[in-house]
Image (tube, rainbow, N blue to C red):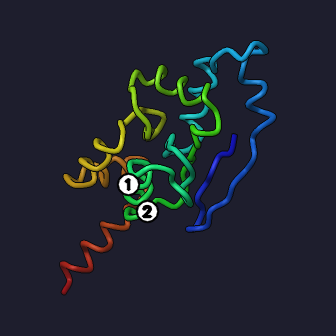
Amino acid sequence: MTTSILRAGLFRSVSLRPLWCRWLGSDGSPMPKEQLEALVKQHKVVVFIKGTPAQPMCGFSNAVVQILRMHGVQEYGAHNVLENQDLRQGIKDYSNWPTIPQVYINGEFVGGCDILLQMHQNGDLVEELKKMGIRSALEDAKKGQEEK
């Protein structure tokens, strides 16, 4: 499994394959709830997508990555569910949400692409990020427009 972390706009990939072996039962059983909880709380913002932020493998995952990029979210955990079917099904069961991508802020399930897009459009995403100490780049852009 590869976890992707964006820092200062640079993509870095860290291989966590040995950890995944511990997280799966020796019989290949699904990931325990505690392990999924650890993943969603790893960073302030965590996404489960098809592909990676540098190369999303579906339009909905790409939209999530682009929305975060628009807001200037430079550091977040990204998990490629295409690399691990147990993770893919496990996160769906954990959230009780049937689709990927999935977005978590502060360890709480926010929703999928449609919910994140709606939050982006109505300004709720700016407020949620602010609660986490993340300043949205759109706030700065808006201030710049108001000053003109």
Q: Is residue 5 above or below residue 9?
A: above
Residue type at mark 2 is Arg
Q: Label 2 crowding class (10 Å Cα cut-off): few <14, some 14-19, many 20+? A: some
Q: Residue at (61%, 20%) from the top-left corner?
A: 34
Residue 39's label in the rendered image is none
Q: Residue at (19%, 52%) from the top-left corner?
A: 122
Q: Residue at (36%, 53%) from the top-left corner?
A: 130
Judge by depth and name the residue closer to the eye, 56 or 77: 56
Left or right: where 103 falls relative to 128? right
Residue behind mark 2: 69
Disc with the residue nearer the chain's start (2 vs 1):
1
Q: Label 1 crowding class (10 Å Cα cut-off): few <14, some 14-19, many 20+? A: some
Judge by depth and name the residue closer to the eye, 74 or 26: 26
Tell me the mark number nearer the camera, choosing from 2 and 1. Answer: 1
Q: Residue at (30%, 66%) from the top-left corner?
A: 139
For the residue labelled by badge 2, is the local secondary structure a helix, a strand or a loop? Answer: helix
Residue behind mark 1: 63
User: Residue 36: where, in percent of width, then height?
Assistant: 58, 26
User: Residue 1: where, in percent of width, then height?
Assistant: 69, 40
Q: Residue furthest bottom?
A: 148
Left or right: where 26 falls relative to 94? right
State how far apart marks 2 and 1 are (Cα).
10 Å
User: Residue 83: where, in percent of width, then height?
Assistant: 64, 39
Residue type at mark 1 is Ala
Left or right: where 38 falls relative to 59? right
For the residue labelled by badge 1, is the local secondary structure a helix, a strand or a loop? Answer: helix
Judge by depth and name the residue closer to the eye, 76 or 82: 82
Q: Is residue 94 above or below residue 56?
A: above
Q: How many marks?
A: 2
Q: Is residue 80 above or below residue 19?
A: below
